[in-house]
Image: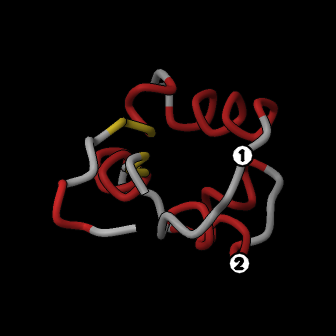
């Protein structure tokens, strides 16, 4: 998938655990893990806004586009 999720980077910068972030954002740790590991198919803007609020960052700090390689197949 060409969208890469960099929540781990912000968690490390803010010295937060997944559980603590999930609690502050108001989502389950399991749902945060799905998003964090790039397995989510979608993210609600309200969730993205809450993540940005808690992590004091911009959406672009959490999500980035990366071109798929030509040999990836598909």
Residue under the image location 76 percent in, 30 percent down: 45
Rendered image: mark on residue 43: 1
Mark 1 or 2: the one toward you: 1
Q: Position of residue 15 (x, y in %)?
A: 36, 55
Q: Position of residue 14 (x, y in %)?
A: 37, 45
Q: How many marks?
A: 2
Residue under the image location 37 percent in, 49 percent down: 6
Residue under the image location 81 percent in, 32 percent down: 46
Relative placement, left or right, of 4 versus 27 is: left
Residue under the image location 73 percent in, 69 percent down: 31
Q: Quadrant of the N terminus?
A: bottom left
Q: Position of residue 22 (x, y in %)?
A: 69, 60
Q: Label 2 crowding class (10 Å Cα cut-off): few <14, some 14-19, many 20+?
A: few
Rendered image: mark on residue 30: 2
Q: Is residue 2 above or below residue 39?
A: above
- Could you tell me which secondary element the residue under label 1 belongs to? loop
Relative placement, left or right, of 12 versus 3 is: left
The residues bearing labels 1 and 2 have C-alpha atoms spaced at a distance of: 14 Å
Q: Quadrant of the C terminus?
A: bottom left
The mark that comes first in sequence, 1 or 2, is 2
Q: Are marks 1 and 2 in contact (CB under 8 Å)?
A: no
């Amino acid at each position: 998938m060409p969208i890469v999720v960099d929540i781990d980077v912000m968690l490390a910068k803010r010295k937060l655990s997944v559980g603590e972030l999930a609690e502050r954002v108001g989502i389950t740790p399991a749902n945060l893990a799905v998003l964090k590991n790039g397995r989510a198919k979608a993210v609600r803007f309200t969730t993205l806004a809450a993540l940005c609020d808690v992590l004091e960052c911009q959406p672009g700090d959490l999500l980035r586009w990366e071109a798929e390689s030509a040999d990836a197949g598909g």
